Image: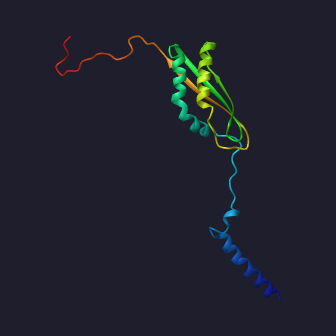
Amino acid sequence: MRIHTSLALVALFVPAVAVADAPRALPKLAKLQTPASKSLEASEVADQMRFYTTDINKCYLDTAGQVRGAGKLEIKLAIHRTGKLDGIDVATPGLSVRASKRIADCVKAIVTDTAFPERRAPTTAIVPFFYQRTSAPSSGPQLSCWNPRGCKT
């Protein structure tokens, strides 16, 4: 009796292993799907914001283009878990209140309709932009001459 029981178990077990090892053993509905991550990755935010880079740069340079030295523009995005924007804060340290407000209004008008992928939790992202304006003496194009026989002045 023990031999028959053992043979019966082997007969049932071997086909089950063979079926489980088949590449399409599970039906499509039973396959596990990876859940969305808890919050957005920096690369996802950068991918969405790169479309607006030239317009944002134009907002800053039109208003603060003549400011010497280093300039910084920070866009703080409060992103709802559905992907819609809850809030937009724009910071421009070192500029006057009037210039900061003009830049903020311009940037908010550009970024307002941005949508991100859905996540399980809200995300706060800060997107920085850096600017540098210098006035180096004797910078710019230099007139020169190239001639194998030499240049006459």
Give residue 82's position: percent from left, percent from top.
Answer: 70, 42
Left or right: residue 123 compared with residue 147: right
* Residue farthest toward the left in the current orientation of the protein: 149
Left or right: residue 19 compared with residue 57: right
* Residue farthest toward the right in the current orientation of the protein: 1
Where on the picture, by quarter, is residue 8? bottom right
- Name the colouring of the figure: rainbow
**Closer-to-camera residue (42/111):** 111
Task: Report how many numbered discs are placed on residues in the image.
Answer: 0
Give residue 4's position: percent from left, percent from top.
Answer: 79, 87
Residue found at x 63% / y 39%: 115
Left or right: residue 153 compared with residue 93: left
**Closer-to-camera residue (13/122):** 122
Residue found at x 66% / y 74%: 18
Say which quadrant the N terminus sits in: bottom right
Where on the picture, by quarter, is residue 28? bottom right
Left or right: residue 150 compared with residue 40: left
Give residue 37's position: percent from left, percent from top.
Answer: 69, 45
Give residue 143's position: percent from left, percent from top.
Answer: 29, 16
**Closer-to-camera residue (6/56):** 56
Residue found at x 63% / y 68%: 24
Say which quadrant the C terminus sits in: top left
